[in-house]
Image (cartoon, coloured by chain):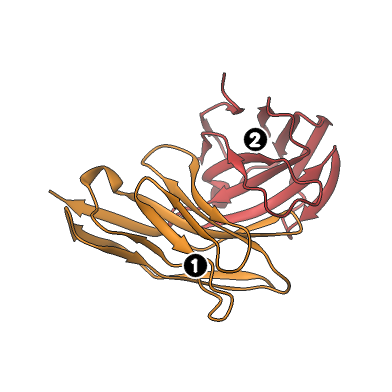
Amino acid sequence: DTAVSQTPKYLVTQMGNDKSIKCEQNLGHDTMYWYKQDSKKFLKIMFSYNNKELIINETVPNRFSPKSPDKAHLNLHINSLELGDSAVYFCASSPSGGRATSEAFFGQGTRLTVV
Amino acid sequence: GDSVTQMEGPVTLSEEAFLTINCTYTATGYPSLFWYVQYPGEGLQLLLKATKADDKGSNKGFEATYRKETTSFHLEKGSVQVSDSAVYFCALNRDDKIIFGKGTRLHILP
């Protein structure tokens, strides 16, 4: 069983379109994250949710809207896609609950290409 | 704010060489520290971690020691293999916010 799974793995779309990336974790974790990895491999946190509540929003354009229907899912919807949104997006989860010793478990990533 | 700084890459070594990748951090309080590895086309995998000062994390021949006095968590391996070629990320967790360094690409030549 895949612990953190995200779909799709690849996404090619035109500028101006709206798209969604889905993420599910079966680890029973309380906290989920979205990270963006650029072409230089730099990983930047975008959002984190704890038990369906938004905890961190790191100055991400409001075209990006995370949605957490339950604590096992954290989806990312992107409106009006721009060329600069091209990147690999990683979903992750961790047990947390104040346990700052916890590591994050990552999905395989979604490579988004905006043309 | 909290941050992680790691040495710029790429680092190129011959097989069986000794590896050090430097990592220093800035954070209030006492974060947990991690090394993650990313193989080509894959997500990040935890390599090792340390949760308090003087802890040593180790896995697959890699080691790192949490040094509070120097705010460092350098990654070392005594004898690298071609299969160790990957991107390595140092990271910290404070209050459930996991912050990564910029990554160091490692190439091991046979």
Q: Chain of mark 1?
A: B
Q: Residue at x 53, y 36 (%)?
A: A109
Mark 2 surroundings: few (<14), some (14-19) or many (≥20) residues within 10 A: few
Q: Is residue B98 above or below residue A66?
A: below
Q: Nearer the viewer, residue A37 or B37?
A: B37
Q: Which chain is red?
A: A
Q: Chain of mark 2?
A: A
Tag 2: residue type?
Asn
Secondary structure, mark 1, is loop
Q: Nearer the viewer, mark 1 or mark 2?
A: 1
B57 relative to B92 in the view: left or right = left
Q: Which residue is mark 2?
A: A17
Mark 1 surroundings: few (<14), some (14-19) or many (≥20) residues within 10 A: many
- Rendered-image quadrant of the N terminus of chain B: bottom right
Secondary structure, mark 2, is loop
- Numbered mark located on residue A7 in the image: none
A29 relative to B45 in the view: left or right = right
Q: Which residue is mark 1?
A: B73
Q: Is residue A43 above or below residue A77?
A: below
Quote the CA–CA distance across marks 1 and 2: 43 Å
Q: Residue at x 79, y 44 (%)?
A: A49
Q: How many marks?
A: 2
Quarter of image, res B33: bottom right
Tag 1: residue type?
Phe
The hue in which chain B appears in the rendered picture of the protein: orange
- Where does the image place residue B9, in percent across and percent down from the top left? 34, 65
